[in-house]
Amino acid sequence: MTQLSDRILRMEESATIAMSRKSRELKAQGKDVISLSLGEPDFHTPDFIKDAAKLAMDENYTTYTPVPGYDELREAICRKFKRDNGLNYGKDQIVVSTGAKQSIANVMMSVVNPGDEVIIPAPYWVSYYEIVKVAGGKPVIVNADINADFKISGDDLAPHITEKTKAMIFSTPCNPTGSVYSKEELRSIADVLKQHKNVIAICDEIYEHINFKSKHESLAQFDEIYDQVVTINGVSKAWAMTGWRLGYIGAPKEIAAACTKMQGQFTSGTCAITQRAAIAAMDKDPSFLKGMINAFESRKKLVLSLLEDMEGVKVNDPEGAFYFFPDVTSFFGKKAGDRKIDNSTDLSMYLLEEANVAVVTGEAFGDPNCLRISYATDEETLKEAMRRIGEALQKIK
């Protein structure tokens, strides 16, 4: 029998990918499963981006690319950061990777030593925890519940910073909760970080344009911590380019150079055609996205009203992304027939098997009291999914 590494044996499988796989397996068996488990827009990539990709092929952009990305793309990303976020990054502070997930892994592997502590506010995106572990770091969790809109403050953060703290990582808008940090909330975090100059803050802003109530705010806007912040972003969510695989960072030069070095030994530069297409996305005014954002907001309002009508489901009103993260603890310790529901993992499996609706256990995101529900699908499908969930929950006594 093959002896696998301790590293891979310690790693958990992505819960979102695992639930998506189970959904596909059930569909292959002929079951009518509605999957609300993956964070993938149901929109197609805009034609102007596809046209840029076709032109790139015609112009023979089919060879190896520079490890950190084409100069033209990195310059376009600099323009995007300035236009959308008020952030001044130079080309040598930008590294393009095969998705924001690789960007995060590059940063962690570049700054974290074995035993270093990395603070992760919970709920958190499922892969943060495992990436920290692979880098040899120790995840330090700071919990925030639904009553705090799943956000932490500087006061929450401060007691968890020790001499071993190397970094923190969080997202805004947040996956899995949809919560969005305001400028004032980010300032409270910045006020703590500026007292700890050796701590790197990794701010994942992949959902920045899917924001319903306010202007997106970046942590790196605060001059006093600019050199401590790595800004993560990409094209998957707003530009519906999940399969194109392109993410990027804006970072202090030393970290950007380290990420380029790391990437050079693992994957080298990402797809040439994707990069040329991404230049078109970066240079497009984000007002182009208004139709998609309005559609997501309409879906959010629909699902919010349906969840609020379900007895025992506690839900907040998320300001961004395309997720709900309802508290479902009222169902724990109860039964549906002979089936006992002890936690959100039990409940997610019950909903999959009883209601044929796939959602993801909150345990995977650091909060076992909740479920993650993606509303990145059409309204008729969402209505049917919520009907099924509601009927299944009524059977739990």
Image (tube, grey):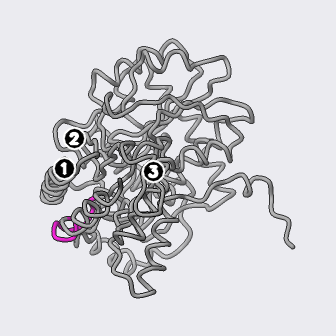
The quarter of the image holding the N terminus is bottom right
Relative height, residue 257 to residue 389 (above, below): above
183 drawn magenta: no
Q: Decide which of tag 3 and tag 2 comes sooner along the chain.
A: 2
Q: Name the residue carrying label 3.
A: 344
381 drawn magenta: yes
Measuring from the top left, give residue 147's x and y in whole percent: 31, 29
Residue 274 is at least partly visible in this image: yes
Tell me if mark 3 has few (under 14), some (14-19) or many (20+) residues whose alpha carbon lies within 10 angstroms of its own: many
Secondary element type, mark 3: helix
The one nearer the camera, 162 or 373, is 373
Labelled disc at residue 317: 2
For badge 2, the amino acid type reads: Asp
For badge 3, the amino acid type reads: Ser
Q: Decide which of tag 3 and tag 1 comes sooner along the chain.
A: 1
Which segment did they paint magenta?
375-382
- Please tell me how many numbered marks the rendered image carries: 3
Tell me if mark 2 has few (under 14), some (14-19) or many (20+) residues whose alpha carbon lies within 10 angstroms of its own: some
Could you tell me which residue is drawn at 19 percent across and 47 percent down?
A: 308
Please indicate whether residue 131 sits to the left or right of residue 32 in the image: right
Q: Name the residue carrying label 1.
A: 304
Measuring from the top left, give residue 109's x and y in whole percent: 65, 44
The one nearer the camera, 368 or 113, is 368
For badge 1, the amino acid type reads: Leu
Please indicate whether residue 64 sits to the left or right of residue 41 in the image: right
Mark 1 in CB contact with mark 2 (< 8 angstroms): yes
Tell me if mark 1 has few (under 14), some (14-19) or many (20+) residues whose alpha carbon lies within 10 angstroms of its own: some
Secondary element type, mark 2: loop
